[in-house]
Image (cartoon, grey):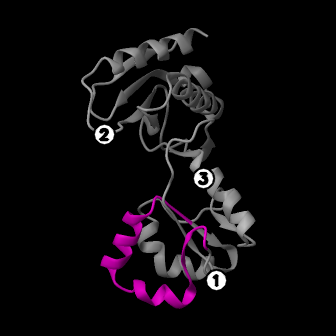
Amino acid sequence: MELKQEILKALDELRKNEERKFNQTVDLIINLQKFDVKKQNISLFLSVPYKIKDKKIAGFFETKNKGVETITPSEFKNYAEKKDLRNLARKFDFFIAQANLMPKVATVFGRALGPAGKMPSPQLGILMNADEKSIEALKEKIDNSVKIKIKEASVKLAIGKQSMKNEEIVENILSVYNAIQKILTKGKDNIKNMEIKFTMTKPQKIQIK
């Protein structure tokens, strides 16, 4: 309960800043301690209670699908140039694929999507059956998920939008905080503090007691 109050207080402070002409993103930074990045390679997807934004999703499927922008095998040849691959990786937030196409997807698109951290993943992104119902269910899951990849002694991710209610942002922050605490070897002891900020503001620090 105490942590929730601290987060609400920090959000109130952030909202006192000058209004901007766009809907700012709420960024969460979880600073770690007594944590060896080399020994603990953490990469996972977490579901949050409230959707942060509609993600732009592309799919590698055998046939066109009206619910998602589709790249079929006959179109793979359009991405022979590095420039086209880079543009594709930039254009979409997320890529999903039909399982049987994955070897070919990896060969053609891996060099661009791999480094960008956007390759379709078994955790969230590869479908055995690319029917509309499965694709819609996966899209919904993706929109309500955040990717956590710990490369340094802090976790940084977008957790909401300024236009969301404080309570919704708090729920999203707590769900990520609780999930990360569970996967760290020393749990809460590995978390030094948290910070939240809007795109154009300085961060507000939240102490972990």
Residue 188, image quadrant: top right
Q: Nearer the viewer, residue 125 or 152?
A: 125
| Crowd rating for badge 3 (residues with CA inside 10 Å; few <14, some 14–19, many 20+) | many
At x 62%, y 27%, the residue is 178
**Mark seen at residue 13:** none
Residue 139 falls in image quadrant: bottom right
Q: Earlier in the sequence, mark 1 or mark 2?
A: 2
Disc on the earlier residue, 3 or 1:
1
Residue 88 within the segment the image draws in magenta: yes
**What is the secondary structure assignment of the residue under circle 3?**
helix
Total labels drawn: 3
Q: Amino acid at mark 3?
A: Ile
Residue 130, located in which quarter of the rendered image? bottom right
Compared to residue 41, the image places residue 96 above or below, namely: below
Mark 2: which amino acid? Answer: Phe
Instruction: Determine which residue is flagged by label 1.
Output: 63
The x, y position of residue 147, in whole percent, is: 53, 47
Residue position for label 2? 22
The residue that mark 3 highlights is 142
Q: Which residues are magenta?
A: 66-95
Residue 161 horizontal/vertical position (percent): 43, 36
Position of residue 54 measured from the top left corner of the image (x, y, whole percent): 51, 51
